[in-house]
C-alpha cells in the first residue's frame, strides 16, 4: 500500500511516516521545508526516514497546483493520504495571516481536488486542531459541540478545512476524516512548542514565559498516542450511510487535562534544574483550558492513550539532551 504523507519532515508527519514504514507500507513524503522553524531539524528527520525501505521524498508546496498535479501523476498508485502539511502556530497567525490561508486552506483544497483523480482513493485523513473549539466554555470539548467561534486565524483556517472536506465528501463521495489534535509533544518536537521552549530556556538559565499567570490547563498528548490514533483512523475509512457524506471528525487527545504548572514542575524534575518563571497575561488567540472528549474515538477505533506527562516529559528531555547535546 502506498500512502502519501504531507508535512513528512514535520513533527507529526515524521513520526507517522516512520510508523507506516515500520509496518511495511510505502510512503511518499512531501514537504516544502519552509523556514518557519529550523530547517536542519526537518532535514534530520528526513535523514532518518531516508534510511528506511519504502520511503520517497518530494519537496513541494501543497498549494502549488501544478506541482501537486505532477506529484499525483508520478504516484498514481497512492491509495491513502495523510495530510499533515500545515502552517502551524496560533500566535504566529497574528503576524502572518496570509501564510495560514495559503498553506491550510488553499493547500488543503488543492490536495483534495487533485487526489480525487486518483484511480483508487481509500481514505484521506487530515490534521485539524483542538483550536477550532475557540470560545467554547463547555469542557471537555466534544465533536458534538458548535465550532463557530474561532479565536485565531489559525483556528479559522482549520475549521475551513473541515467545511471544505464535507463538501468534497458530499459531492465526490471521497472518504475524508479530520483529526482534532490536542497539544502534541514528544521527541523530535517543534522548537516553537511550549515544551521545547521551556527546556531550552531552563537549561540556559533564562526565564520561561508562562501565560495567564500560570492558570492554564492543557490536554497534553504524547506523540506515540497521536500516531496510534492517526493509523487507527486511517485503516477504517468512513462510509456513506443514510444519505450522510463519508466525512467525519474526531478528537485525538490524552483524555486528561493537566495544569500547566504541574507540567513545568515535571520538566524541572527531569532536567534537574528549577525554572525562572515570567508570568504574563493571556495572549490573544489563546484559551485557558483544553480537554478532549474522546468518546467517539474510543468507540469507533478502540483508541486509548497510553502515555501521560509523568512518563512522556522525561522521554522528551532525554531526546533533547541527546539531539542537542545539552
Image (cartoon, rainbow, N blue to C red):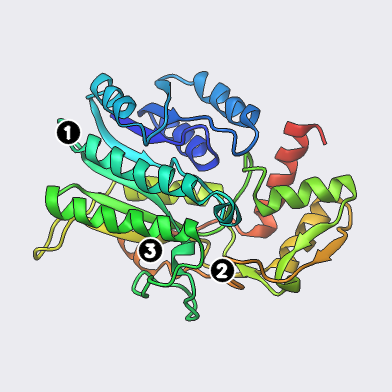
**Neighbours of disc 3 within 10 Å: few (<14), some (14-19), many (20+):** some
Within-10-Å neighbours for mark 1: few <14, some 14–19, many 20+:
few
Residue, disc 2: 256
Residue at image coords 71%, 47%: 196
Task: Say which label, 2 or 1, has the lower sequence index.
Answer: 1
Report the disc number at residue 223.
none
Residue 273: where, in percent of width, then height? 89, 53
User: Label 2 to label 3, Cα distance in Å?
Assistant: 14 Å
User: Relative to residue 164, is residue 292 depicted above or below?
Assistant: below
Q: Name the residue under label 3.
A: 298
For numbered disc 1, what is the local secondary structure? loop
Q: Is mark 3 on a helix, strand or loop?
A: helix
Q: Mark 1 — residue? A: 117
Residue 23 lies, in percent from the top left, at 40, 32
> Residue drawn at (83%, 63%), measured in percent from left and top?
278
Closest to the observer, 11 or 108: 108
Label total for image: 3
Q: Quadrant of the C terminus?
A: top right
Viewer-closest of 254 and 244: 244
Q: Quadrant of residue 261?
A: bottom right
Q: Which label lies toward us, 2 or 1?
A: 1
Amino acid at each position: 500500500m502506498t500512502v502519501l504523507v504531507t508535512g513528512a519532515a514535520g513533527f507529526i508527519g515524521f513520526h507517522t511516516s516512520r510508523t507506516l514504514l515500520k509496518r511495511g507500507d510505502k510512503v511518499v513524503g512531501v514537504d516544502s521545508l519552509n523556514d518557519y522553524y529550523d530547517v536542519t531539524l526537518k532535514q534530520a528527520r528526513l535523514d532518518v526516514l531516508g534510511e528506511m525501505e519504502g520511503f520517497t521524498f518530494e519537496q513541494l508546496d501543497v498549494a502549488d497546483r501544478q506541482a501537486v498535479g505532477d506529484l499525483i501523476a508520478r504516484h498514481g498508485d497512492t491509495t491513502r493520504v495523510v495530510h499533515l502539511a500545515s502552517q502551524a502556530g496560533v500566535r504566529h497567525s497574528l503576524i502572518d495571516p496570509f501564510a495560514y490561508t495559503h498553506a491550510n486552506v488553499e493547500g488543503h483544497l488543492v490536495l483534495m481536488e487533485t487526489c480525487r483523480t486518483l484511480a483508487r482513493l481509500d481514505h484521506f485523513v487530515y490534521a485539524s486542531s483542538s483550536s477550532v473549539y475557540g470560545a467554547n466554555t463547555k469542557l471537555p470539548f466534544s465533536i458534538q459541540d458548535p465550532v463557530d467561534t474561532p479565536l485565531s486565524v489559525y483556528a479559522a483556517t482549520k475549521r475551513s478545512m473541515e467545511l471544505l472536506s464535507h463538501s468534497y465528501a458530499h459531492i465526490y463521495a471521497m472518504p475524508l476524516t479530520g483529526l482534532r489534535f490536542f497539544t502534541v509533544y514528544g521527541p523530535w518536537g517543534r522548537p516553537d512548542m511550549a515544551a521545547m521552549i521551556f527546556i531550552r530556556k531552563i537549561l540556559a538559565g533564562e526565564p520561561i514565559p508562562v501565560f495567564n499567570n500560570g492558570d492554564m490547563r492543557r490536554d497534553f498528548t504524547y506523540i506515540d498516542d497521536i500516531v496510534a490514533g492517526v493509523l487507527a483512523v486511517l485503516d477504517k475509512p468512513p462510509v456513506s450511510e443514510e444519505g450522510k457524506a463519508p466525512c467525519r471528525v474526531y478528537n485525538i487527545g490524552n483524555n486528561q487535562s493537566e495544569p500547566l504548572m504541574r507540567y513545568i514542575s515535571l520538566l524541572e524534575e527531569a532536567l534537574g534544574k528549577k525554572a525562572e518563571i515570567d508570568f504574563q497575561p493571556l495572549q490573544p488567540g489563546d484559551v485557558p483550558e483544553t480537554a478532549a472528549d474522546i468518546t467517539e474515538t474510543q468507540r469507533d477505533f478502540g483508541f486509548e492513550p497510553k502515555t501521560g506527562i509523568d512518563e512522556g516529559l522525561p522521554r522528551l528531555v532525554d531526546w533533547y539532551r541527546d539531539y542537542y547535546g545539552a
